[in-house]
Image: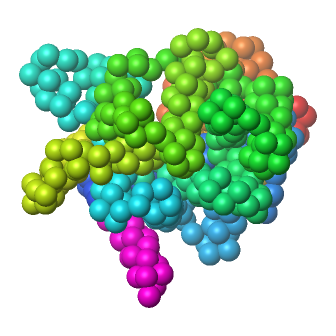
Amino acid sequence: MNALKIAIRRWGIVMFAAGLGATVFAATQISYWIVAANTPEKHAPVGLVSLAMDIYSYYSFIWQAADGHWLFNNAMTSEPCDRIFFNLQWLLLGKCMAWFEWTPQFTFTLWRFAGAISLVVAFAVLSIQVLPQTSQRIVALLMCAFGGGFGWFIALLGDLGVVDTSDTMGLKNPAMDLITAVHPFGQILKNPHYSLPHGTFLLFACAFIQGERTRKMRWYAIAAILAVIQGLFRPYDVISISALIPIYIVTEFVRNRSLAAKTTMNRALPLVASLPLLAYFYYIFSIHDVFKWWAIQGKQLPTPATWHTLSLGLAGLLFLYRLSLCKKRPFTDPADRFLIALATTLLALYHANHISDAFSFSPQIAIPLLAPLILVGLSALPYIRERYFNNRHKMWFAVLCAFVVINSLSSPLYVVWSARIGQDTPRNYARQTDLDAMNWLKKNARESDVILSNDVIGGRISFSHGGRVALGHWALTPHVKKLKKQFARFAAGEFSPRKAKRFIDEIGPRYIYVANIPREKRPIYLRRNRDLRRVYFNQDVAIYELSPRLALAR
């Protein structure tokens, strides 16, 4: 009977988590409605709020999967690129788009919903495994679903003129938890490529912890399988897992002063499974002639440790408080020790770019950071209740409610700030004339045809139908800064006919997408070049076709 009650409680927590995930999705959808409601005249909303160029780049791969491919090339460059890249998440999305005839916008919305449910439900499963009390699990879920940092307080200081939160954006904003996806709430709002893999990462942690508790090899094997799936979903997490497992093995060796061969081999299974992926992704992003530009140009500046610490909010403070109790209440449960190792690893990797440019990607590492902070920190609740609120149940309940509310204050602001920034971002809207032109390209351009335009239009083409573009993303397109300057001068008519021809020959496009202007004002190389003909135009857009013979000659 007790087992039945326990099972019912656990399923109740899971169902509660599913409801929370749906609620968070609905709350974050407000930002999208606000951005759509403020669409400029003669424009249409793209269906995004933030990170438009990154999301466009995802679709350059998703469309390849929809077109029947299982391996991907870089379609955001005119440079020849073999099909060598594999991403399971984008493959599944592309296949679903093709099978069910979803639009890119509907796919993105459904992807966000799946990310919300995946993240919160997986966190619920981990909380059931780690936290013994139902009240702890509910507080943990509320912190996960709606939590934020101290950005709300910093925003108040900004309004008073004490702190500047307007001119510094992204990872250098003092209220960074109102700008970046530090917390699960922000990940669900901004980018399902964060939230969905976050959920699978937490399932990996569940399996490994179960292996630590039972010492049964099958759980380590399941953890290894999930580690591989995680790496195929999001390559950054291969680095995290490859660093985490050795760190955990070493800390357990130091703690126990022994290294049992069988246990160590079992613990190493996820590492062994991840190493081939680590080597594969190292080749892709460090050696491959085209894909290596993704890493070369995708550098991120170090995050100020002060702002990052404040962005962790009450979860970070409670985590530190629990660590301070380690002498009074040692970490006897391997789950706590594993989660501490995970938090330590992620924090170290996150700030590794302070040490070396080789870790310039490291701010992307810390997507799963809040989960271990919350779960380890909440294990201090029984001690706090026993010491400060013994037999004062109503006061303790009030304190927990206040704690959850204060922890969630940044989330409404996150919705407002995201909407405000989103509606001021031109990339979140498209002129109807551009959409009409892209629809023509969708019907006429072949998969191998290169389309030359500026980077924003190139990214939007990748989102709308997955065409191959010469210029499309600030990291994926090789030599992107040089190409942006060259195309701007080309489109403005600043190139001489000789330089324009040389530029076109280097790119080898089939189509050139430029502003439609009266014939007498067009650059001479568009007016007199017999190898170019205008094949589409409307009041804003002109599309020129280069002779197929010349386009393919390159």
Quarter of the image with the C terminus is: top right
Which residue occupies the foreground of this view, 26 or 516? 26
Identity of the residue drawn at 70% across and 47% down: 231
Q: Is residue 439 left or right of residue 195?
A: right
Identity of the residue drawn at 61% across and 72% down: 101
| Residue 8 part of the magenta-drawn span | yes
Quadrant of the rendered image containing residue 326: top left
Which residue occupies the foreground of this view, 56 or 17? 17
Secondary structure predominantly adopted by residues drawn in magenta: helix
Identity of the residue drawn at 51% across and 18% down: 301
Render colour scheme:
rainbow
- Vertical side of 511 occupied by 5: above or below: below
Q: Position of residue 173 (x, y in %)?
A: 33, 23
Quadrant of the rendered image containing residue 181: top left
Whether residue 461 appears in this view of the structure is no
Whether residue 328 appears in this view of the structure is yes
Q: How many marks?
A: 0
Q: Position of residue 104 (x, y in %)?
A: 54, 60
Quarter of the image with the N terminus is: bottom left
| Residue 209 part of the magenta-drawn span | no
Quadrant of the rendered image containing residue 131: bottom left
Identity of the residue drawn at 28% across and 38% down: 314
Q: Position of residue 171 (x, y in %)?
A: 41, 25
Q: Is residue 185 left or right of residue 340?
A: left
Q: Position of residue 17 (x, y in %)?
A: 39, 67
- Vertical side of 512 occupied by 110: above or below: below
- Vertical side of 113 occupied by 432: above or below: above
Which residue occupies the foreground of this view, 392 or 118? 392
Residues shaded magenta: 1-26
Which residue occupies the foreground of this view, 280 or 374? 374
